[in-house]
């Protein structure tokens, strides 16, 4: 009885402790067709999403800047971009290390790389010529590397490929053929700033490589007994891996300097956040009918956001949240975007900026001293 009461108290505390929230409006947003892409810096939140007409055509990008201290919109602009019909996935929206430049990307045809001024949201330059060919699958745009170059990755034949491009002229400054894939169909797990990538050797084993394909000493070998892997993400020098079965059994495992830690869950976790906040990542944890997807078991019965701290790992905060995504088509190798909440640190507060089915962003403020 005491154990049950203590567990309930811990869960209640993780859900409610130190929380405040407010909403920000999105102009002409339809999250069934386009999800907001977000980035932040200097106390300003930047957001971009396509708007659509009644026939589901789109040729405009709505871009806004919000002051997170006053909760007010600072600027809003509309940018003409290539026309599409139906749902459209953005690959990312990133702020340069010096805080001066924004880059927005859509990496499948018709592709777009758009550079904006962070000061007034004016267009600086654009290109439709991205460093991909028809032979590149699993395409990825990962924003800026440690030197401010634009970072792209893809899979070509059996190997990963890493490309850097300069912002001023869009010239390719480096191209490296990386390690050979062992398993296929999974998202690329890569840190362009540390120039390292993680590959799955088996469904439960991960190996870290340098971009040139040489081995690192880091390796995670963890077998989850209740189901398959659900991907991974890199937090600095740590790997956070997700596992789950067809209904309500899951785990998050952290690998750090030769040591592993496990968090068991009564739901299936999926990586679900963006932003570069030390030691924190978000996951959406779902339950579904207890049967395989091909037998109708892919319907989501419950969906909850978990703010995970890599120390442990542990749950720092949790909240009910819709599991959102859009895809360019049913083809597995066209664009897909998840409704990733943005994590952003503002002093002792950790901000979680989350989209929803309505045309607003909800900003949750969590006490999270460094």
Image (cartoon, grey):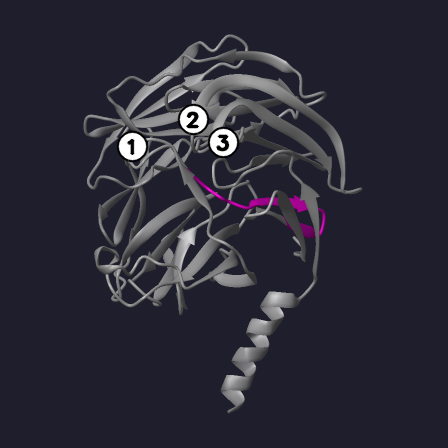
- For residue 2, say whether it is visible: yes
Residue of label 3: 92
Q: Where is residue 63, by image quadrant?
A: top right
> 63 or 317: nearer the eye?
63
For residue 85, the mark is: 2
Measure how far apart labels 3 and 2 are at the Cα level: 20 Å
Q: Residue at x 33, y 18 (%)?
A: 132
For residue 362, the mark is: none
- For residue 96, say whether it is visible: no
Of labels 3 and 2, the one closer to you: 2
**Residue 342 is inside the magenta segment:** yes
Local crowd size for mark 3, using a 10 Å CA cut-off: few (<14), some (14–19), many (≥20): many
Q: Where is residue 44, by image quadrant?
A: top right
Q: Which of disc 1 and disc 2 is earlier in sequence?
A: 2
Q: Which residues are magenta?
A: 337-351
**x, y percentage for residue 312?**
47, 62
From the viewer's perspective, tell me whether residue 357 is left or right of residue 133: right
Of labels 2 and 1, the one closer to you: 2
Local crowd size for mark 2, using a 10 Å CA cut-off: few (<14), some (14–19), many (≥20): some
Q: Residues at badges 3 and 2 in contact (C-beta under 8 Å)?
A: no
**x, y percentage for residue 191?**
43, 35
Label 2, secondary structure: give it. strand
Label 3, secondary structure: give it. strand
From the viewer's perspective, tell me whether residue 296 is left or right of residue 169: left
Residue of label 1: 333
Main structural element of the magenta stretch: helix, strand or loop? strand
Q: Residue at x 50, y 25 (%)?
A: 58
Outermost residue toward the bottom? 1
């Amino acid at each position: 009885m005491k154990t049950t009461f203590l567990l309930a108290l811990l869960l209640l505390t993780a859900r409610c402790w130190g929380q405040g929230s407010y909403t920000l409006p999105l102009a002409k947003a339809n999250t069934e067709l386009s999800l907001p892409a977000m980035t932040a810096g200097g106390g300003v939140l930047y957001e971009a999403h396509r708007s659509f007409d009644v026939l589901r055509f789109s040729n405009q990008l709505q871009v806004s800047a919000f002051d997170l201290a006053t909760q007010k919109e600072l600027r809003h602009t509309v940018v003409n971009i290539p026309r599409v019909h139906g749902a459209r996935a953005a690959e990312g929206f990133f702020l340069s290390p010096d805080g001066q430049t924004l880059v927005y990307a859509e990496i499948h045809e018709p592709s777009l790389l758009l550079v904006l001024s962070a000061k007034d949201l004016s267009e600086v330059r654009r290109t439709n010529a991205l460093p991909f060919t028809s032979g590149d699958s699993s395409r990825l745009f990962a924003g800026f590397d440690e030197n401010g170059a634009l970072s792209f990755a893809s899979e070509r034949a059996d190997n990963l490929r890493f490309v850097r491009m300069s912002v001023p002229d869009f010239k390719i400054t480096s191209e490296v053929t990386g390690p050979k894939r062992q398993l296929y169909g999974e998202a690329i797990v890569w840190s362009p700033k540390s120039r390292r990538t993680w590959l799955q050797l088996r469904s439960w084993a991960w190996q870290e490589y340098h971009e040139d394909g040489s081995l690192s000493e880091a390796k995670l070998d963890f077998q989850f007994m209740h189901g398959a892997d659900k991907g991974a993400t890199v937090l600095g020098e740590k790997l956070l891996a997700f596992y789950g079965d067809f209904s309500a059994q899951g785990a998050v495992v952290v690998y750090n300097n030769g040591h592993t830690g496990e968090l068991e869950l009564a739901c299936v976790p999926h990586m679900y956040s963006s932003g570069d906040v030390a030691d924190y990542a978000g996951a959406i944890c779902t339950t579904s009918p207890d049967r395989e997807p091909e037998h109708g078991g892919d319907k989501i019965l419950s969906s909850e956001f978990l703010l995970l701290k890599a120390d442990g790992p542990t749950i720092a905060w949790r909240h009910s949240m819709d599991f959102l995504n859009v895809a360019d088509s049913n083809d597995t190798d066209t664009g897909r975007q998840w409704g990733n909440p943005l994590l952003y640190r503002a002093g002792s507060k950790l901000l979680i900026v989350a989209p929803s089915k309505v045309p607003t962003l909800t900003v949750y403020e969590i006490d999270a001293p460094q």
